Image (cartoon, rainbow, N blue to C red):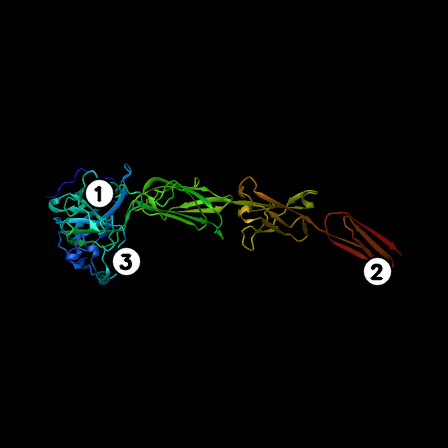
Amino acid sequence: MIASPAIAEDGPYNIDGVVPDAGTTEITDDFGNVKELGPLNSNTTKIGVIHDDAVPTLGSTNPNAQVDLRRAWLDTAKDLTTGDDWLYFAWERDKNTGSGFIAYEFMQEEAPAECDYENATEADLIANCNPWANRTDGDFMILWDQQGGSLDLYLRVWDDSSGTLLLGAPMALDATVSQAAYSADGFRGEAAVNLTDTIFGGVTGCLTFANTIPSTVTGNSDTADYKDTILQPTPPISNCGTVTIRKETVPDEDPNTTLFGFDRNFTVESDAEPPVLEFDLTDDGVQTWDDVFFGTDYVVDESDIPAGWALDSIDCSASTGYEPGDIVTDVAAGTVSFDLTSGQTVDCTYTNVPQTGSLLIVKERKHAADGLGETHPHEGVGFTVTGGNLSAPGLSGSTDADGELCFDGLVISSLVGDYTVTETVPDGYVSDDSAQDVSIVVGPDCADEEDPVTVSFLNTPLTDVTVSVNSQVDGGTFSSIECDVAGSDSVSLADAMDDPSITIEDLEPRTVVCTIVIDP
């Protein structure tokens, strides 16, 4: 007869015999009339001493259906009401009338390197692997008595205070810290245990169990034999998790000298006393804490952004164990907010970009046909912008019908230096200043109504003046021409028997006075 579920504590889990709970990790195993790896049957492979067994520890076994596990499930979670950490474990066996005990052993150290279950051959595992070799003080086992459909759970903890690693006496787990249930058909079972009250209680640091071995054993004594074991990689059991914060800048800063300041509101095991909750990162910098205690309402804040920089994005997609929306990012506030529990890692990248501004180039010319004495827009004039962080040959363009050319997205000059605007002066014109330096600041974009940083250019058309004398009789006159160009020290002279001519080129607007003397 299968016992009905007890009324007991199950923390964040629902121990009702519907196996497994959602979101738990499945661990598969061979079953049926097949050979599978398990401990050899000898005096040195009993529960209490197998860690000292010299290889070969494993061999090919074929457990009977009553003790043959098909698969197991494993998980940990925090009870958000009490803050306690809970363990969930479940199993499925090949027959619904089991015997002996279900045992889950939790070891702090990872399985030995020789026990590479995913890559090593069976022959290599038999020759070199003892999965229990790294047992240490504080490791523990939870055993479930299967006889008569019992729901009794026991905790046994390894202790080396005597100088010898010994398995402590069984401690019954009562309904205040545990609950167990069978499925209706008897093939499966599940249980939850309060780790905070039974294992983590009083622990002030991080405690992790990296190697878990589900098994069936013949009893609850040190001399019990293993019947079936599931030798597979398992998720770690811990009261701490990992948080990683990364910094990137676009474009990539080289060298990485700009410091971005952060705050955190959580403490870690390795913190000094008092803890320093501020930290700095440069471009390509990474800050990782692998000893963050499980908890809720954790926040990381980019609180000190250097002048000239802006936070562009926060990407936490590299995090694991979270559903969309579980980690809340706020770019405007510079914050990442999250809870942390078993099976979760936080991995967020803050990306900053230089603040930018825009540059408006205004090009005007004097053109009499459009109005005397006034300046007018000059269309089609080419300009090149260099300097700042621009790669050669820079940015180039031509003015529109309004005589304007605008460039967006220029990194502000306080970060990259000034820019130089150079005009390609059209033929027939002279520029007041064909190259001008300009400082870019944060300001409106080109499409905004308000003008951004503006630099203006004015061109003046040039004039050629030609004065000539044409005697109607060849050689009939001896003439001279003298021109005084206002604003210039130069005087143009022509004195010849033949008809003289003077051409003065590239004159800007001014007065030119020419004196012509005709002498026969």
How far from the left and from the top, in percent, is residue 110? 27, 53
> What amino acid does circle 3 point to?
Ala
* Label 2 crowd bin: few (<14), some (14–19), many (20+), radius 10 Å: some
Task: Write the residue at 49% across / 53% down.
Answer: 255
Q: Which amino acid does label 1 sit on?
A: Ala
Amino acid type, mark 2? Asp
Vertical side of 475 occupied by 161: above or below: above
Q: Upstream in the sequence, badge 2 or badge 1?
A: 1
Q: Distance between the residues labelled 2 and 3?
A: 110 Å
**Alpha carbon distance from label 3 to label 1:** 30 Å
| Crowding at mark 1 (Cα within 10 Å: few <14, some 14-19, many 20+) | many
- Observer-nearest of 273 and 64: 273
Residue 191: where, in percent of width, then height? 20, 44
Q: Quadrant of residue 263?
A: top left
* Image location (x, y in percent) of residue 260: 46, 45
Q: Which mark is residue 498?
A: 2
Q: How far apart are marks 2 and 1 (CA)?
A: 121 Å
Foreground mark, 2 or 1?
1
Q: Which of marks 3 and 1 is in front?
A: 3
Q: Looking at this rendering, what residue extends furthest in the right direction? A: 520
The numbered mark at residue 192 is 1
At numbered mark 2, what does the secondary structure look like: helix, strand or loop?
loop
